Image (cartoon, rainbow, N blue to C red):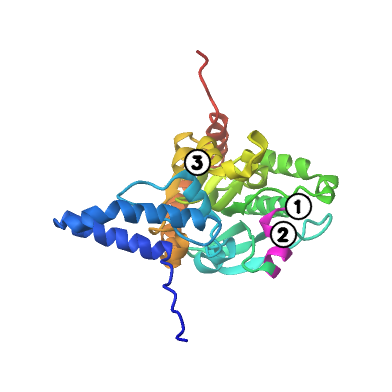
Amino acid sequence: MADIKRRKRPSVEEIEKDIAKAQRDAAAGDRGAKRRLPALRKRLEDERANNKFSAYTPVPVDGQPLTPWERYQLASNKNRPLSLDYIETLFTEFHEIHGDRQFGDDLAVVCGTARFAGKSCVVIGQQKGRDVQERVRRNFGMMHPEGYRKALRVMKMASKFSLPIFIFLDTKGAFPGVGAEERGQAEAIARNIRDMFALECPVIVTVIGEGASGGALGIGVGDRVLMLENSWYNVISPEGCAAILWNDPTMASRAAEQLKLSAPEVLKLGVIDEIIPEPNGGAHRDQQATFGQVRETLERILAELESLPPQQLLAERFAKFRKIGVFNES
């Protein structure tokens, strides 16, 4: 009996290419291509739904922007560049600093001295890990109290020597374990937020993937806060929000809409200062282009901040965060 050959199911990327070609043909007057477009779009939505937890990369269709839920999924893509990727590509002479001098070393956050564009600096990044073993070792980028204390120790050193600080946020939140709470998790985050307002040096924060809750904010106070186009920044993940509000994690896409967590929405709310563009389909599709965009943005912003005296930096940093959340009663 002859072997039965199964037709390979088209991937999201292949369907997107088919749609792009049909759009070009339709624009050129091909009526058949125009008739095929609705079915292709339907197939794309079905495939996205079937692969919502996979590494697929949604891209805009017909110029329509991605939804917050789609951006959220891109931020979680397993191939997305991590903090160490940015550190290794954008910085030279990186020397890691370990330990908080109180309890131990937290591998969920990487801290050290380096050079950026030929200038000495300090760099800090939350590192989730690439494979299972590294993710466990890095605690999936969820910092312990000693991680926040290590980061603050390095930031205070940078302030003492007037070194600019570059921070990369990428976490689902601070670690909520019993041990972390016993060692003062909330106090460590609160102290970092307070003391970062007193750093007498430029501080540039970039959300490169996921920026959740106090876990991100604990090292997220800066003169400029940036977000990659398909990253997210909020108090909670859509799944967590859906579980609390509706007791139904499948409502996550609706929660993502309500949370206003995507970069364009967070920019509109005044929580961040600028969005760094990504290649079509996400940062992982062209990592070198992403690194180039980030480098260019950081160099420009660093030049702006270096021209300001320390006291002006402090005043503007305080005013920037002070105005977030202002509302009018009616």
Tell which of 241 and 153 is nearer to you. Answer: 241
The answer to whether residue 277 is seen in the rendering is: no
Q: Horizontally, is 293 left or right of 149 in the view?
A: left
Residues in magenta, as a range: 133-146
* Pointer 3 residue: 272
Q: How many marks?
A: 3
Judging by the rendered image, the residue that carries numbered circle 1 is 144
Amino acid of disc 2: Asn
Question: Residue 90, image x and y in percent?
Answer: 50, 65
What kind of element bears circle 2? Answer: helix
Front tag of 1 and 2: 2
Task: Give the distance between the C-alpha atoms of the residues marked 1 and 2, in whole angstroms.
Answer: 9 Å
Residue 214 is one of the magenta-drawn residues: no
Q: CA distance from mark 2 to mark 3?
A: 27 Å
Q: Name the dominant secondary structure of the magenta segment.
A: helix
Residue 11 in picture, x, y percent from top left: 43, 65
Q: Nearer the viewer, mark 2 or mark 3?
A: 2
